[in-house]
Image: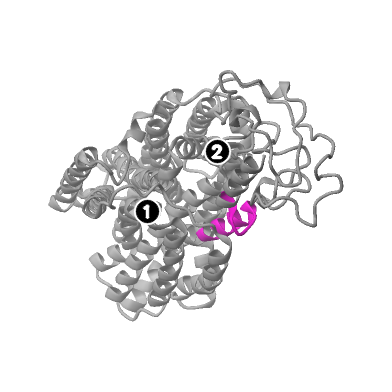
Amino acid sequence: MSGTTTAAALRRRAAGAGANRWVVLVVLCVSLLLVAVDATVLHVAVPAVTEDLKPGAVELLWIVDAYPLVCASLLILFGTLGDRVGRRRVLLLGYALFGVASAMAAFADDAHLLIAARALLGVGGAMIMPATLSILRQVFPDRRERALAIGVWSAVAAVGAAVGPLLGGFLLEHFWWGSVFLVNIPLMLVSLPVGRILLPESKGDGDGPWDVAGALTAAAGLFALVLGVKRLGTGELGPGTLVPSAAGAALLVLFVRRQRRREHPLLDLRMFSRPAFSTSVGCIVLAMLALVGLELIAAQYLQLVLGLSPLETGLRLVPLTFAAMAAGLAGARMLRRFGPRRMVSYGFCLTAGAVLLLTAMGSQDNAPLLLCGFVLLGFGLETTLFGAYESMLSEAPQEQAGGAAAIGETSYQLGAGIGIALLGSVMNAAYAPGLSQVPGVPAAASAAAAHSLGEAYEVAARLGGPAGEALRHAARHAFVHGLHVTLLVSAGLLLAGAAMALRLPRLMHCDPAPETPSGAPPASALPTVPEAASGAAPDVPSGAVPGAGSGPGAGREAGAGAVSGAVPGAPDAASGTGAVPGAADGAGSGAGPEAAPGAGAGSGPVHMPAQRESRGPGVRV
């Protein structure tokens, strides 16, 4: 028993050393909240930054895009580096860099310094994002608890994305634009020491050298590809869009070929041969493609068609965020009830239904319709993302958790960029023809108005009179028509995602109890196990006692809550204490002064729980 107890205690300590795993989850969620808020908080500060620093058009574009570009390109690099040198180490370094870059951005006195600070924020974000998910994978080895933790994690991400613009607007009303960055510093000063004390360190297997050339190739390829996709989203089809897109695709092809040849690859691409993993990544891309593109178009509709203020627009989108939070918190229960296949597929179908419902939007405000549509949209998309992230992370080997998390976050960023480019192109293609022949409007004015609804309003204001009013009315009608077409295309993509999700596992696969070795009696045939004061015990095959052994499922809470070598009433698995009442700390040192009465030699037998019947690798919980 002492060997089994020692092994179990060591596994529990490795999973949650230094702190309760739920406290670790709180620390990780705070990290995620900061990064999610910083990704959107600058959007409302752009006018103030433009007025103060007076950047050119290209400089302003880089001020906005430097953070997501750098972050997306470095996710794989730092995700795999964390697997090699330690995920907590990379996370803490990301905290420090994020705080320093926030101070640089807050006090930047020219556009170039602000661009550099935003790029450094992207580096810090790329360190933090995959590390939070990979540490979560380590701290919650039991899939049922991990599903609940991922639900909380995803709910916090939804909150951060929504809070960013609201927080930015509040700070700009009372302080200068640098305050949107300055708020990060005190939180990072707290997160650094707390994270160092509470977060456990974890690494992968560390076989072979880290592929520096491969990591840089992946970073360069992703940077160029994301840059090309973002420029495509603005309607540019020239060399500035095609060259980086082609170069990025070529570099990523070289990266894949290099990884397949190496004995110790940076990323184990064999993960993509697992249907659950590759399907989950595809579902994340499709879900983000729909979410970001629709949010952008919805914000334009609310402000330019309905005439709402930015604050009113943000408040109209709040129900979407609350619905996403509810889906994240209920995700673990839904995953156990429906399984990954039905959960993700139902999420896509619910989102498609919400999108079709929103096609009833017109030129007049219909608040109940928008409320219902946004609630269904937020709940459906978060259900989809939760099921896809949980399946992807659970399917990846634990030693590759950092790389798997980086792949998930990269697919998230690529889906967002592709969504803006694709749905924006569909919107423009459906919008422009409606302004080709407006009575009383010159052809040049109609061509300029066809670029966007905002530009159409500017042209209409310059024209004035009946012609200007006719152009304004035609532009609103054309935009609503384009919105309907875009929603229909989105619904088709979401239904394609529902079909793709059918490749996911039907049930939530949890680790079953270890099977009894051939020739060994089942656990139910072992009614008693004498326990000596010294901790010694007769040799019992590791599979004969629930949770014993050191296989992949060892140390995880199996079914009825039994842990390795545990008996009824044993302490929580995260505590690291001995599994037998009165035994020592699991170090195999025998009974100390705290031993319970009667636990010494000659004491009564300790009854072990009968082994739960195994139902194969797909245990429905």
Q: Nearer the viewer, residue 236 or 523?
A: 523
Residue under the point 52% across and 52% down: 157
The furthest residue to the top: 519
- Residue 447 shown in magenta: no
Asked if residue 271 lies left or right of residue 568, the reply is left
The residue identified by callout 1 is: 84
Asked if residue 232 lies left or right of residue 176, the reply is left
Pick the quarter of the image with the C terminus: top right
How many C-alpha atoms fall within 10 Å of the one at disc 1: few (<14), some, or many (≥20)? Answer: many
Of circles 2 and 1, the one toward us is 1
Asked if residue 469 lies left or right of residue 246, the reply is right
Would you place residue 606 above or below residue 18 in this image? above
Which of the marked residues, 2 or 1, is nearer the chain's N terminus? 1
Highlighted magenta segment, given as a residue range: 15-31
How many C-alpha atoms fall within 10 Å of the one at disc 2: few (<14), some, or many (≥20)? Answer: many
The residue identified by callout 2 is: 373
Identify which amino acid the numbered label 1 is placed on. Arg
Pick the quarter of the image with the N terminus: top right
Would you place residue 346 above or below residue 313 in this image? above
Give the x, y percent position of residue 597. 86, 48
Identify which amino acid the numbered label 2 is placed on. Gly
- Residue 27 shown in magenta: yes
Give the x, y percent position of residue 619. 59, 25
- SS of the residue at dot 2? helix
Residue under the point 16% across and 53% down: 240
Would you place residue 79 above or below residue 500 in this image? below
Q: Nearer the viewer, residue 239 or 363?
A: 239
